[in-house]
């Protein structure tokens, strides 16, 4: 991964955490994603990995985002993980091997649900560096992503499996809609600007 531009404070720009109810949530996520995407190679292969399972309401954020992104049928990114074909603990390693074999030097964006403090439930995070799927439920899984987005769907720290199973679907749905639409808008805008910059005068 490339270093953060010195024109930005690394502490301010490497991560964003914002409530999904914030009126400026879409704009904030789009701008933060654009900041990270501009550090990628121009028109680099963008791969989105949406992790989770539809067998748990708390853990279906990733597949919901993936299915929403799939509806755009966009050539601007490669997508792994939907409600119909989820990427989860059992096939994550295989999926990562497939991505490395299929895409040359991809820029990977990981999407997953996570648990957190009660005051953070409902927040969406955009973070530089890989996510660590399964950490909240004590699973050892490979890290995913050059950057990642997570939605804090419920409170962590005690009986995580039970908490995920008893998470409100309405919250997860709202967060998935925000993440998918913001991510699609950011990639489309980044691609448009990169294309214009690549055109010789």
Image (cartoon, helix red, strand yellow):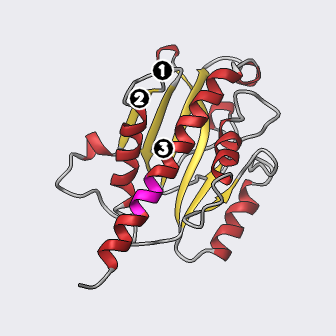
Q: Compared with residue 180, is residue 117 higher up or lower down, i.e. above or below?
A: above
- Percent position of residue 85, x then y: 80, 52
| Magenta region, residue range | 186-190
Question: Quick check: marks 2 and 3 in contact, CB under 8 Å?
Answer: no
Instruction: Name the residue tied to disc 2.
Output: 18
Q: Compared with residue 16, is residue 148 higher up or lower down, i.e. above or below?
A: below
Q: Quadrant of the C terminus?
A: bottom left
Crowd band around label 2 with a 10 angstrom C-alpha radius: few (<14), some (14–19), many (20+):
some
Q: Nearer the viewer, mark 3 or mark 1?
A: 3
Camera-nearest residue between 45 and 138: 45
Instruction: Name the residue tied to disc 3.
Output: 182
Q: Residue furthest bottom?
A: 200
- Percent position of residue 78, x then y: 62, 64
Residue 25, by quadrant, is: top left
Residue 159, by quadrant, is: top right
Q: Secondary structure at mark 3?
A: helix
């Amino acid at each position: 991964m490339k270093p953060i531009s010195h024109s930005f404070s690394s502490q301010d720009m490497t991560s964003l955490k914002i409530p999904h109810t914030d009126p400026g949530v879409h704009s904030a996520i789009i701008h933060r994603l654009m900041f990270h995407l501009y550090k990628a190679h121009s028109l680099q292969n963008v791969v989105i990995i949406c992790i989770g399972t539809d067998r748990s309401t708390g853990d279906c954020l990733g597949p919901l985002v993936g299915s929403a992104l799939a509806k755009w049928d966009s050539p601007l990114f490669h997508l792994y993980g939907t409600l119909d074909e989820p990427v989860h603990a059992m096939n994550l390693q295989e999926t990562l091997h497939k991505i490395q074999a299929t895409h040359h030097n991809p820029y990977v964006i990981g999407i997953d649900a996570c648990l957190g403090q009660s005051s953070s439930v409902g927040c969406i995070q955009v973070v530089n560096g890989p996510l660590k799927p399964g950490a909240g439920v004590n699973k050892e899984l490979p890290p995913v992503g050059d950057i990642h987005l997570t939605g804090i769907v419920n409170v962590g720290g005690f009986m995580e499996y039970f908490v995920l199973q008893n998470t409100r679907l309405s919250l997860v749905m709202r967060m998935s809609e925000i993440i998918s639409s913001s991510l699609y808008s950011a990639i489309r805008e980044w691609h448009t600007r990169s294309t214009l910059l690549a055109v010789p005068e």
